[in-house]
Image (cartoon, rainbow, N blue to C red):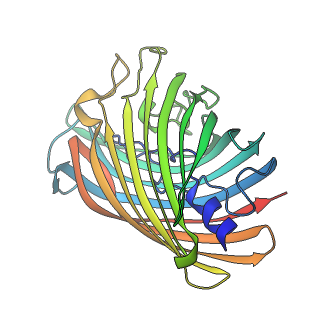
Amino acid sequence: MKNKLICAALLMAAAPWAAASCGAAFCLVNTNWTLQGPVNEPGLRMDLRYEYADQDQPMSGGHKVGVGEIHRHHDEVYTVNRNWLANFDYTFNQNWAVSASAPVVDRDHFHIHNHHGHQLEDKWNFRRLGDIRVVGRGQWALESTASLGFAGVTFGAKLPTGRHDVKNGEGEEAERSLQPGSGTTDLILGAFYSRVYAEQGLSWFAQAQVQRPLAEREDYRPGSRFTLDVGGRYEATDRLGLMLQLNAALTGRDNGAEAEPEDTGGRALFLSPGVSYAVAKGVQLYGFVQLPVYQKVNGVQLTAEQSFVAGASFRF
């Protein structure tokens, strides 16, 4: 049980999250972990997760509004996000590791274009590779008589691998914040701390991370983002783990001629309960539901009443 707790507590990189008028988003639940085997054991681990977020509730500031209640050039109606995220982690030794994550973005979007007194319906439906992230990790054990702790740093980059010029069947290019890729290279820096109480079957973690674009790309620069995750895990049985997280994000406004700064960025806090189950040696399944506790957006943006995450973690 001690090794399981150690690995569950060592979280490596928060999942990406975006707030934009069109509702393009990833869930904020932190699942980039190593779930099996001692953390200093060299080798490859893989995590595959699926996310579902139906963003059909417009908000202005901290209040829900109706579609078109606050006039915009585009009245956002809904965005349905079905994302797959694969994370590969390789541990070199007890102090150093590297991970790479690749998202596949499956997105449906509908908005009403207000054009010279006419309301035109615009829709997009696409499935594309998103922006790949490569993140290194340095970690150090902090032992005590009653528990084992870890502290560490993360450092890396989000790469512009996703397309940022996807069009619909009518040849209309989607808004930049809706695209599967931002077109920018972003710097990623973070720090984490976790502690394991093996005798009690408990562990907890905290992680802070900043993601900042290094430059504008084709008149667009997404807002910088700060995330903070705090969570705990209880080993109910040898196979079943109960988890609870608080996930917070602060996102700046997008900038550039192709951006919508008045309707991007904001603050959010989510409560994310979850469970995990070890189905075999080296294989664990998990699921989370993410519930908004507090949201305040700039301008008018689409939000979801709840989001869902399900996945599997493998050790080779």
176 up-or-down from 194: above or below: above
Residue 65, image quadrant: bottom left
Marker count (numbered): 0
User: In the rendered view, does 256 fall on the left or right side of 64?
Assistant: right
Does the rendering let one see residue 68? no
User: In the rendered view, does 51 fall on the left or right side of 215?
Assistant: right
Furthest-front residue in this view: 145
User: In the rendered view, does 19 fall on the left or right side of 80?
Assistant: left
| Residue 66: % across, % down | 19, 57
251 up-or-down from 126: above or below: above
What residue sits 34% from the left and 59% below the top?
Answer: 270
What residue sits 66% from the left and 42% below the top?
Answer: 101
| Residue 95: % across, % down | 68, 39
Quarter occupied by the N terminus? bottom right
Viewer-proximal residue, 10 or 225? 10
Does the rendering let one see residue 35? yes
What residue sits 56% from the left and 71% below the top?
Answer: 287
Furthest-right residue in this view: 316
Viewer-proximal residue, 17 or 4? 4
| Residue 63: % across, % down | 15, 55
Quarter occupied by the C terminus? bottom right
Furthest-bottom residue in this view: 237
